[in-house]
Image (tube, rainbow, N blue to C red):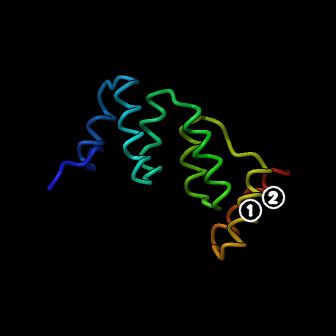
Amino acid sequence: MAKSAYPGPLERRHLLERELGEAQALRIAEAYLAEGRGVDAVQFLKVAGARDHLETLRSEAVASGDVFMLRVVAEASGVDPSTEEWRAISETARAAGMQRYAAEAGRQADRGED
């Protein structure tokens, strides 16, 4: 069996706990992204300082109605989701039949208006 281009869960944890260079972190993140594993890539993107990649993931989360991904990216980037993002994600999630995500995003949008 061929070795994966990205680390397994234990190796991932060890890499994130030690000093990891930006270039190496970016390579690992891009390997995760190539496999469609954005959530796993986020912490490596943060270490790499790859704000453009984080913004892309953020936009994809809003476009797909993925509340979980939006929260992960927002935490990593230090930028809270806007009320407009919560509204957009709520509409997208509702249209996709993801009622739980739609309801959560709707609650977050309502909190942002206060």
The amino acid at mark 2 is Asp
Q: Position of residue 9 (x, y in %)?
A: 28, 50
Q: Position of residue 73 (x, y in %)?
A: 56, 44
Position of 38 with respect to 1 (left or right) is: right
Q: Position of residue 113 (x, y in %)?
A: 85, 51
Q: Secondary structure at mark 2?
A: helix
The amino acid at mark 1 is Arg
| Residue 89 sits above or below residue 75 on the image | below
Q: Nearer the viewer, residue 60 or 84?
A: 60
Q: Nearer the viewer, residue 9 or 26?
A: 26
Quick one: quadrant of the N terminus?
bottom left
Position of 52 with respect to 13 (left or right) is: right
Disc 2 from disc 1: Cα separation = 5 Å
What residue do we see at 24% from left, 47% from top?
Answer: 10
Q: Quadrant of residue 75?
A: top right
| Residue 25 sits above or below residue 83 on the image | above
| Residue 103 sits above or below residue 34 on the image | below
